[in-house]
Image: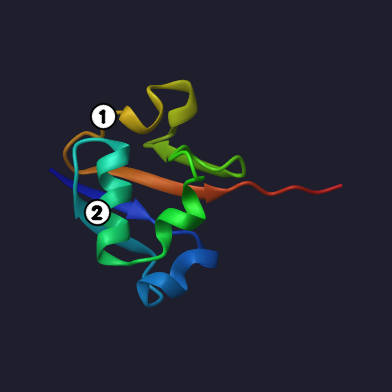
Amino acid sequence: MAVTIRIPTTLRPLTGGRPEVEVEAGTVADALSALNAAHPGFSERILDEAGSLRRFVNVFVSDDDVRFLDGLATIVPDDGTVSIVPAVAGG
């Protein structure tokens, strides 16, 4: 299934500046793996050593945070959108 991944500005150098990348995937894990295969360097920035999402990286399928769904096993519908959103802290 074709899935669009929205890339945050801070990670766009890995995609040659592209704000979106299309991959074939059925789950969030598949989408992130395909993204890393096409544009190496994403996995170490998005996933920790255990293969889980890093604490300060949020991933959404449509408008839903995958942490409140099935995590990396969340199904992405055909023509769905996965958004990578770095957490922003402030004071």
Q: Which one is earlier in the sequence, the residue at label 1 or at label 2?
A: 2
> Which image quarter: residue 12?
bottom left
Residue 55 vs 21, above or below: the answer is: above
* Mark 1: secondary structure: loop
Find residue 45 and name its label.
none
* Residue 66 place in picture, x, y as percent: 43, 30
- Nearer the observer: mark 1 or 2; the answer is 2
The residue at the point 34 percent across, 61 percent down is 20
Query: Looking at the image, is 3 positioned above or below residue 52?
Result: below
Which residue matches tag 1? 75
Residue name at image x 43 percent, y 38 percent: 60
Is residue 77 positioned above or below 18 on the image?
Answer: above
Q: Residue at position x 50%, y 56% from top?
A: 45
Number of residues whose C-alpha sits closer than 10 Å to that of mark 2, classed few (under 14), some (14–19) or many (20 or more): some
Q: Position of residue 38 (x, y in %)?
A: 25, 65
Residue indicated by mark 2: 34
Q: Residue furthest bottom?
A: 16
Label 1: few (<14), some or many (≥20) within 10 Å?
some
Q: Residue furthest top?
A: 69
* Image label count: 2
Residue 22 falls left or right of residue 54: left
Q: Amino acid at mark 2?
A: Ala
Where residue 21 appears, x then y in whole percent? 29, 61
User: Given the image, on which type of amino acid does mark 1 rest?
Assistant: Ile
| Distance from Cα at disc 1 to Cα at disc 2 | 15 Å
Residue pushed farthest front? 49
The percent position of residue 78, horizontal first and vertical second, equals 16, 38
Q: Secondary structure at mark 2?
A: helix
